[in-house]
Amino acid sequence: MPPVATSWRRIDAWLSRHASKALADLRPPASWQCIQEAEARLGFPLPADLRESLRCHDGDTSLLGVLPCRRLYSVSEIIEVREMRMEMWEPDDPDQAQTPWWGTKWVPISGGDGDDHFIDAGEGMWRNHLGDAVHDDQGCFLGWPSLGSWLHEVAEAMEHHGQSTWFGAVTAPKVDSSGDIHWWN
């Protein structure tokens, strides 16, 4: 799997050529100091792929998201959303053991309106896997073993946009005449 920064360079290059409005929605990199302060507040390190991704772009400012995952969170939004989730989380709720709504080491990476994609920063078989936690149901894992593998597949989908023969794990984006990017038909 290529480094996260390599996938981001491919994504940025494609956006520059095909959807410059979306490229402008990506924030500049987060500083190492900002990331380290967030990790201190969390009480555990961020997954390596997330740290590397935040060093490329500290989230995005779009309404619906530049990538097919809702809007990417900045470091400060990651902390804010996780703290909100943890305040509502009920560790003594027996349903949490069977069908968790939120995990103690889940780190939100994107979302909106209470629906968040996350990375599992805990130990065990789901470590570094991407998941989806909607506001009114249990969380689930999405099949991506890491943020890096997902970003690589997003870059692949972008580079194959407009090719009817592309059948990757991520649907190729469409760009309309005004330069807006769409990931779903």
Image (cartoon, rainbow, N blue to C red):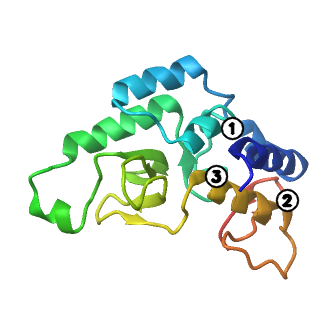
Visible residue check, residue 83? yes
Q: Identify the residue at image location x=42%, y=28%.
A: 39
Residue at the disc numbered 1: 26
Q: Is residue 104 left or right of residue 143?
A: left
Q: Identify the residue at image location x=70%, y=71%.
A: 171
Q: Which mark is residue 177?
A: 2
Locate residue 114, reporting x and y percent: 37, 51
Q: Earlier in the sequence, mark 2 or mark 3?
A: 3
Quick one: label 3, few (<14), some, or many (20+) residues within 10 Å? many
Q: Amino acid at mark 3?
A: Gly
- State the residue in front, 70 or 121: 121
Q: Identify the residue at image location x=35%, y=25%.
A: 41
Q: Amino acid at mark 1?
A: Leu
Residue at the disc numbered 3: 148
Q: Identify the residue at image location x=84%, y=68%.
A: 160
The answer to which image quadrant residue 156 occupies is: bottom right
